[in-house]
Image (spheres, helix red, strand yellow):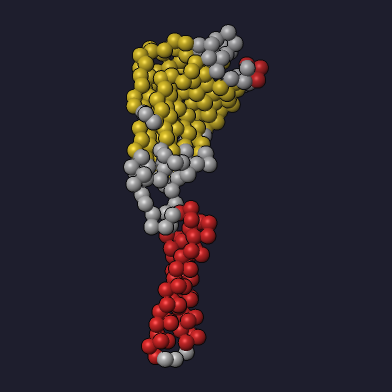
Amino acid sequence: MRTRTRNRVLAGTALAVGALTVASPAYAALPAPVADAYVVSTQALGGMVAVAPSPHSAYPSGGTQTLVGLNVGPVATTSVLTATTAGNPADGTASASATVDKLGLDLGVASVSLTGVNSTCTATPAGATGSGLIAGGSITVGIIPTNLQANAPANTRIDIPLVGSIVLNEQTTDANGALTVNAVHITLLPALNGANLVIGHAECGGAEPAAAVPMINASVAGAGGGAVVAGILATVYVRRRNARTAATGA
């Protein structure tokens, strides 16, 4: 009888250990929330200088950065460029956005016109979502224009002969769960320096809430923590069994 009782208790212990291990919270790998945003960034094109990320906002410390017009390298616009980032370590969230109403690019062999660029990214400890959209646009090679799709699905790629490729609403996630969104990413052919141009960049990643104090550390539970819990439960079982034995004299 005692053998069957012991087996039931040990089985219950195994189930309890499994439940505790499964219930351990899974947070993003980043130690703290991060975010980054800018409206335009280009590498040098022939005789045109490179454009550093402009305007640029990064969390921490975050906030909104704006430029009223820009005419540098291949970029030309009279519109307001806005980049914003924010984060909250208490709940592990972060956000980023980049917007500009109208912008043109001179690629030498082609010209690009964009309207209504709007990239966003929102992150929590569970993951991140976002989008990089344009209201409209075109790329003209010689006298032949190619329209760019408005509100394109994620990672819509367009190959442009003699120029390179364009990816609309480009989205990638790294090993830490941070999401990078580019409304427009242009990659030129090697003959054109293989340069990269990004319009509308928003990046964000969530993290474990600073206020969270798990009952059992998630890293311990993932690396032998189950054995620790099992040992505690087994000790409780043995003490209770010994107490019953002493009381009954069995």
Q: Is residue 79 visible from the viewing direction of this image? A: no
Q: Which residue shows up at 51% across the image and 56% down it?
A: 222
**From what the image shows, is residue 134 above or below residue 226?**
above
Residue sticking out furthest to the top: 47
Q: Residue furthest right?
A: 191
**Residue 36, quarter of picture:** top left
Reply above or below: 248 against 95: below
Give how far across and how far down residue 23 sits, in percent: 42, 60
Residue 98 in the image: x percent, y percent?
39, 26
Counting from the top left corner in percent of width and height, residue 167 is at 53, 29
Q: Is residue 64 above or below residue 12?
A: above
For the point 38% across and 37% down, the residue is 94
User: Which residue is more in the foreground, 141 or 164?
Assistant: 164
Rendered location of residue 5, percent (x, y): 46, 84
Q: Quadrant of residue 58?
A: top left
In front here: 207 or 100?
Answer: 207
Picture layout, residue 160 above or below residue 90: above
- Who's the residue at 38% across and 54% down the image? 214
Q: Quadrant of the C terminus?
A: bottom left
Residue sitting nearer the eye, 90 or 98: 90
- Number of marks drawn: 0
Residue 222 visible, this angle: yes
Identified at 43% across, 19% down, the residue is: 54
